[in-house]
Amino acid sequence: MGMLAANLAALQNAFGGELFQWQRVHSNWVPIRTVDTQPWKMRMYKAITAALAFTLWCAGAAAQVAPQPPVLAPMPKLNLTLEQRHTIREFVKDMKADAADAKAEIGEPIPQGITPRPMPSEVGQKVPQVKSHRFFLTAQQIVIVDPKDNKVADVIKIAED
């Protein structure tokens, strides 16, 4: 075969099919016309479709790995406005602290050895949500306690930010 025929044969092998019809002219084989490339296109579409399906499958497998939920601070049981927090702070902040360095986290039981006091009646009149709740003071915060389960319902910092 001549150089042109060899290149065309290599091209034909690269595409995996018959692209040309060949005819013997004198001592060489030469392409005389192209063959319909539709079967080649179908193979290409199938290859692309298979690659896309594989990619989507991999993405689906990766999506099935359970993401770790972000660690969020617990939400207070009480939905107090800034004004209500300010009202509570103003009535309670000058009282004597019950525990100077007690750690109180919302939703957690109150620390041992602390007895919460009843909410002052003035606070209960102005902030009805906390009327039945109890509280204790630390050096930096007012801890509101749910009387039903003795767990911390909300924490108000004494020093405003």
Image (cartoon, rainbow, N blue to C red):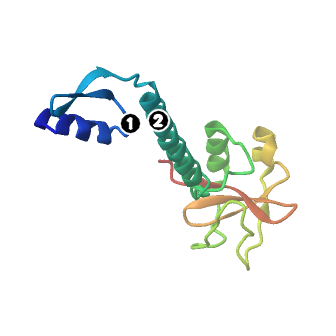
Q: Is residue 124 visible?
A: no
Q: Nearer the viewer, mark 2 or mark 1?
A: 1
Q: Is residue 143 left or right of residue 5?
A: right
Q: Is residue 42 left or right of residue 127?
A: left
Helix, strand or loop under label 1: loop
Residue 129 percent location from the top left of the image? 80, 44
Q: Residue furthest left?
A: 3
Three-letter amino acid code of the residue under disc 1? Gly
Crowding at dot 1, Cα within 10 Å, few <14 / some 14-19 / many 20+, comes out as some
Crowding at dot 2, Cα within 10 Å, few <14 / some 14-19 / many 20+, comes out as few
Task: Work out whether residue 5 or residue 153 is closer to the camera in this orientation and state it.
Answer: 5
Q: Which residue is mark 1?
A: 17
Residue 115 percent location from the top left of the image? 77, 72
Q: Is residue 112 left or right of residue 53?
A: right
Q: Which residue is mark 2?
A: 43
Q: Residue furthest bottom?
A: 113
Helix, strand or loop under label 2: helix
Q: Is residue 109 visible?
A: yes
Q: Quadrant of residue 32?
A: top left
Q: Quadrant of residue 83?
A: top right
Residue 71 percent location from the top left of the image? 58, 58
Residue 40 percent location from the top left of the image? 42, 31
Q: Residue at x 52, y 47 (%)?
A: 54
Q: Are marks 2 and 1 in contact (CB under 8 Å)?
A: yes
Three-letter amino acid code of the residue under disc 2? Arg
